[in-house]
Image (tube, helix red, strand yellow):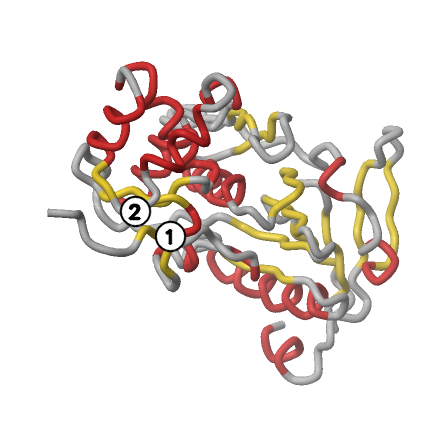
């Protein structure tokens, strides 16, 4: 199959099966199905519950959509978290479509990618979230070649997303705990934070300059999640970590590298702590 895909496969002949918003199962040629709003559709299949496994299916509340997205593994939850924070992502869904194609020997193959993300420019990302590069074996690698070709036909992207570095993932998990709008604080607090962190400043120092830290810190973390304030994610978050307003951010940092499928990430704080 790999030779068939590499030598001349252009993604033609792939079909998409999905359940419409009205609950009707539909199958269309992929070139026609690309106009479907997959971000609004329910999963075509449930994530399995495996006895003895420490991790089971769960739900991620998306700050992007205000809705829950089901996930089936810790690796998938991490990728949902990364995409949810990407400012270019406008929609998220889990397993909304099954892709089917026929091999040269006549056998029909299928694959259900774990994630779909819609970007602000209308393009889409289909993704799987393996915990290791070899997860899924040869079948996953063959499916990758088919899906990459089919998605490229409509200018979209399929990817097997690599887990972010452990420190970055831990920092994002912490900030994600403050992603809900209820943590943004009272009116005027965002402007006060932008003023306090107009230049690079330690997290603790800037929060104390605005008000009582126990009341201000949730708003600081929410602003860091949203990108109103920026910080390096390459190092563990701590009270002396440098924070700055979005306008002061530098480029080319770890958050840009986290922008999956062409979507940019948020920049990092640049500059030195004032002595």
Q: Where does residue 245 sit, x and y in percent of width and height?
A: 38, 44
| Viewer-nearest residue: 239 or 115 | 239
Asked if the residue under mark 1 is in contact with the one under mark 2, i.e. CB atoms within 8 Å, the reply is yes
Q: Secondary structure at mark 2?
A: loop
Q: Residue at x 21, y 30 (%)?
A: 204
| Viewer-nearest residue: 172 or 15 | 172
Splitting the image into 4 quarters, where does residue 166 fall? Answer: top left
Splitting the image into 4 quarters, where does residue 173 fall? Answer: top left
Above or below residue 71? Residue 9 is below
Q: Where does residue 186 sit, x and y in percent of width and height?
A: 48, 17
Q: Where does residue 123 sit, x and y in percent of width and height?
A: 71, 57
Q: Residue at x 76, y 66 (%)?
A: 154
- Image quarter (top left, top right, bottom left or bottom right) of the N terminus: bottom right
Q: Residue at x 30, y 50 (%)?
A: 165
Residue at the left extreme, as displayed: 275
Above or below residue 47? Residue 257 is below
Q: Would you say 98 lies left or right of 225 here? A: right
Mark 2 residue crowding within 10 angstroms, few (<14) / some (14–19) / many (20+): many
Q: Where does residue 217 sit, x and y in percent of width and height?
A: 32, 23
Q: Secondary structure at mark 1?
A: helix
Q: Would you say 233 lies left or right of 31 here? A: left
Question: Label 2 belongs to which residue?
Answer: 199
Mark 1 residue crowding within 10 angstroms, few (<14) / some (14–19) / many (20+): some
The circle on residue 248 is 1
The residues bearing labels 2 and 1 have C-alpha atoms spaced at a distance of 7 Å
Q: Would you say 113 lies left or right of 42 here? A: left
Q: Would you say 157 lies left or right of 224 here? A: right
Splitting the image into 4 quarters, where does residue 133 fall? Answer: bottom left
| Viewer-nearest residue: 60 or 50 | 60
């Amino acid at each position: 199959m790999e030779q068939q895909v590499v030598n001349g496969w252009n993604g033609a002949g792939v079909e998409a099966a999905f359940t419409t918003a009205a609950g009707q199962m539909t199958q269309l040629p992929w070139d026609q199905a690309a106009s479907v709003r997959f971000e609004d559709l329910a999963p075509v299949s449930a994530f399995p519950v495996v006895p003895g496994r420490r991790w089971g299916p769960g739900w991620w509340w998306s700050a992007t959509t205000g809705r829950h997205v089901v996930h089936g593994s810790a690796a998938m939850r991490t990728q949902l978290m990364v995409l949810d924070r990407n400012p270019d992502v406008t929609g998220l869904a889990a397993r909304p479509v099954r892709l089917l194609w026929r091999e040269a020997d006549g056998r029909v193959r299928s694959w259900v990618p774990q994630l779909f993300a819609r970007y602000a420019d209308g393009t889409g990302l289909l993704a799987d979230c393996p915990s290791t590069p070899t997860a899924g074996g040869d079948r996953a690698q063959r499916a990758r070649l088919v899906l990459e070709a089919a998605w490229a036909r409509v200018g979209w992207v399929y990817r097997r997303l690599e887990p972010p570095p452990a420190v970055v993932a831990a920092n994002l998990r912490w900030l994600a705990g403050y992603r809900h709008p209820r943590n943004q604080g009272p009116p005027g607090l965002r402007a006060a934070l932008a003023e306090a962190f107009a230049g690079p400043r330690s997290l603790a120092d800037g929060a104390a300059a605005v008000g009582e830290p126990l009341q201000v810190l949730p708003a600081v973390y929410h602003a860091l999640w949203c990108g109103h304030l920026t910080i390096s994610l390459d190092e563990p978050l701590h009270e002396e970590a440098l924070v700055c307003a979005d306008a002061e951010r530098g480029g080319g940092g770890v958050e840009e590298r986290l922008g999956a499928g062409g979507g940019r990430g948020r920049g990092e704080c640049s500059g030195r702590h004032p002595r």
